[in-house]
Image (cartoon, helix red, strand yellow):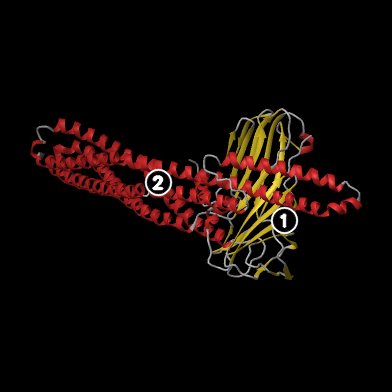
Amino acid sequence: MNKSKIVMSLFVIGTMTMASCTSALAYTKEETVYTKLNPNGEETITVVSEHLKNDDNEQIMKDLTSLSHVMNMNGDEKFTQKGEKINWESQGNDIYYQGKTEKQLPITTKITYKLNGKKATVDEMLGKKGKVEIQIQYTNHEKRNVNGESMYVPFVVTTGTTLPTDTNRKVEVTNGKVSSNGSHHMIIALATPGLSENFHNKELEDLNKTIIKYETTHFELNSIMIVATPSLLSESDMEVFDKMDKGYSLIDQLSSSYSKLKAGGKDLSQNMNKFSSKYNQFDKGVEVLDSKSKILLEGAKKIDTGIEQLDDGLSQLNGGLNKLENNSDQLRKGASQLSQQILTTVNKQLKEAGLPLSITKDNYIQKLSNQITSLNQQKETYQNQLNQLNSLPEDQKKLYAQQIEQLNIAIATIDTAIPQLKGAKTTLDNIFAFEKGVYDYTEGVDQVSKSMPKIKDGSSQLLTGSHDLVTGIKALLQGTNQLTSNSKLLNDAAIQLSRGSQKLLNGLNEFDDKGLSKITSFVENDIKKNVHKTEEMIKLANDYKIFTKVADNVESSTKFIMIVNSKKK
């Protein structure tokens, strides 16, 4: 798995955690920022919807807002506004209001198009066939100073669109997934603009954009929906970093033990080379051989000690993996509970909105899609009725003024409900994808843990061999008196032993270069460093509460929905 996928898997975990937060304050504020984009990704209009949850049935709710053209969207409660202060005569009810803003969004987009490899505008491409490439470039404008370093507030950006299967094929998307229901290709992708800059890692630059490629026989621009939320891991998920700290210490012990083993191997190789080169001087004196044999014994003892430390380190590492494996069930249960909690919350919100669909993991796609289709059909019916009434002469229109007003209120309600239903579907898509990711991760942990006994058995065999080597060298010293009559045989054996010790040293160096050193380097230079940065980014995400304004001590959350309207020839 490449680094961008590793980081993405961390970020997806916390995408919807804010949906389950509760507050003990008098009211909470949920904000949704709706922005229409032209085909190039430029903003045309931004409307902000605010939901004040009247948790304590307050009669008066004091709020702050920077919005203009404020309207009550779901009731007849009155308000007074002075500057940024706005007071609602809530009468114990929740307040839903809407307004406009000129403030720049924290995430902006730039959309470019290619047909058969050449840049083109949407109007130039309409109705044509060929290879299409749509690139959506995201720019993060929310920078903060963290310990003297400039860092971006992390946003998870979800992009979704559909393509008819009868005119489009070979659909691909970066950092996302394409699925088909027979009539349409459904495309969803994730991006995290600013992440590559935070980690100073060019490998993550692909997460600043989404690229959709496909072949078409008749190009049409379908609606594109973009949802951005300032979120990462939840606070409870921070416990994983404490567990990783324990793993770091085991890696350090393994590295230290292996360094001693390699040092012992180096001593063995050096001493055996000396022993072999000097053996032709055997006839000049057994005393030289005796002194070298003692040095050889010391080298063997160092190897033996090093291997014992390696064996101990592997035992500790195995224990750490067992603890991690024991947590797998908790992770799986937690993921399942979170997905169920989100599903329950969505059902509750749908019921409160007058849409008791009773959706489940198996039927939510079909039920939400059917409801959206039904609402669109209702809207079309109401719109036709409204058009007929508006076409009447003015004197007759006055007779239907109340009916016209009522039709304008169905239509507005449907316009609000459809994005909420689509948002609910996106939320459920993300949480169920997260749940599957947790199950895949814990399965990988279980497989690694199961392989550790074989590694431990190999270490124990190596330790036994090391003990045998020390015993053999001691026997070699005891046989010094026999060297005189067996000089030639011993010389040949010394040469072979010298070559073997060199191979052993080469093998130890190769394992260190290609295995252990890379592991320790990755832990020290990538994992530890990125964990600290991720912790800082979590704080930045949690600190980003609202896009507009909110009163002190009011729990708040915000999300951004950007829509590119379809365009057909």
Residue, disc 1: 47
User: Residue 47 appears at what percent x and percent y?
Assistant: 72, 56
Nearest the viewer among 264 and 19 is 19
Q: Does residue 39 show up? A: no
Q: What amino acid is at disc 1?
A: Val
Image position of 330 (left or right of 134): left
Mark 1 packing: few (<14 Cα in 10 Å), some, or many (20+)? some
Q: Does residue 195 show up? A: yes
Q: What amino acid is at disc 2?
A: Ile
Residue name at image x 59 percent, y 38 percent: 366
Residue, disc 2: 519
Quarter of the image for residue 60 reads bottom right
Mark 2 packing: few (<14 Cα in 10 Å), some, or many (20+)? some
User: Residue 83 appears at what percent x and percent y?
Assistant: 73, 71
Image position of 385 (left or right of 250): right
* Looking at the image, residue 479 lies above or below residue 228: above
Residue at the limit of the structure toward the left, as seen here: 481
Nearest the viewer among 507 and 331 is 331
User: Residue 490 appears at what percent x and percent y?
Assistant: 16, 33
CB under 8 Å between callouts 2 and 1? no
Q: Considering the image in quadrants, where does the C terminus appear?
A: top right
Residue name at image x 58 percent, y 40 percent: 365
Residue 84 is marked as none
